[in-house]
Amino acid sequence: MTTDATTAGSLVTRQSRGRDLAGILARRSSWLVLAAVVVALLALGSVHPAPPTRASRISYLDSVIKCPVCDNISLAQSDAQQAQDLRAVVVQMVDAGRSNREIEQYVVAQFGTDELLRPSNPVIWLLPICGGAGALAALAVALVRRRHVTGPPAADAADEALVSASRAGARPVASGPRP
């Protein structure tokens, strides 16, 4: 009977919470706040950034394209003559109106796929995400297993004898070294 009373009590609590939530949403001020938030989010989402300037495009391309004779250094970081020559080609192509993608494709055609300093394979971007998800799953499994631990380990016969002797008021005899 107490189980039925507990179940009925939790049902009443859930119903009252539902009524409270309905009361809050029914108020006009809540709807006005919700409408203001939606309008603000739509306004923020419709703002488009200004197109990149010539200097920012050149800077971006110089940082993404690798120096042809250096080890994993961008054009912007290199002082090698070949890097300066390629930098001049990039500037000419930007001035000619070519897109960043066209310029990157030109560099790959001239020097190979390893000439760009950002990964071209999307799987490389997914590996850290999958690793993080795997770590979270392992943590969840460990926490669930830890939750199901039943309690302290059971006492062995020697421990039981010590407790019985202590309760009886007798002095226990040491049976050997205890850890």
Image (cartoon, rainbow, N blue to C red):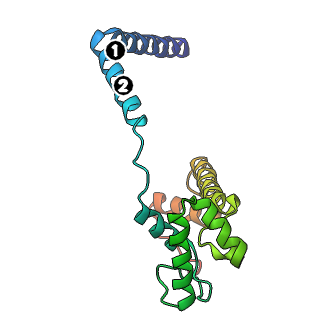
> Residue 109 got which mark?
none
Q: Amino acid at mark 2?
A: Val
Q: Residues within 10 Å of mark 2 (few under 14, many from 20)?
A: few
Q: Is residue 45 left or right of residue 107?
A: left
Residue drawn 49% across and 16% down?
Answer: 6
Of the two numbered discs 1 and 2 on the same chain, state the one appearing first in sequence: 1
Q: Is residue 178 visible?
A: no
What is the number of callouts on the image?
2
Quarter where residue 67 is shown = bottom right
- Foreground disc of the pair 1, 2: 2
Q: Position of residue 3 (x, y in %)?
A: 55, 16
Q: Kindly report the distance in space between the C-alpha atoms of the residues bearing marks 1 and 2.
A: 12 Å
Q: Position of residue 170 (x, y in %)?
A: 47, 66
Q: Is residue 172 left or right of residue 17?
A: right
Q: Position of residue 21 (x, y in %)?
A: 39, 15
Q: Considering only vertical position in the picture, is 76 above or below 145?
A: below
Query: Relative to the observer, which residue lies in front, 8 or 120?
Result: 120
Q: Considering only vertical position in the picture, is 24 above or below 119?
A: above
Residue drawn 29% across and 10% down?
Answer: 28
Quarter where residue 23 is shown = top left
Residue drawn 39% across and 38% down?
Answer: 47
Query: Relative to the observer, which residue lies in front, 8 or 96?
Result: 96
Instruction: Give the residue number, with chain letter if any, for mark 1.
Output: 31
Residue drawn 57% across and 64% down?
Answer: 159
Instruction: Give the residue number, with chain letter if any, for mark 2.
Output: 39
Quarter where residue 100 is shown = bottom right
Q: Position of residue 110 (x, y in %)?
A: 70, 76
Element type at marker 1?
Answer: helix
Location of the C terminus by quadrant is bottom right
Q: Amino acid at mark 1?
A: Trp
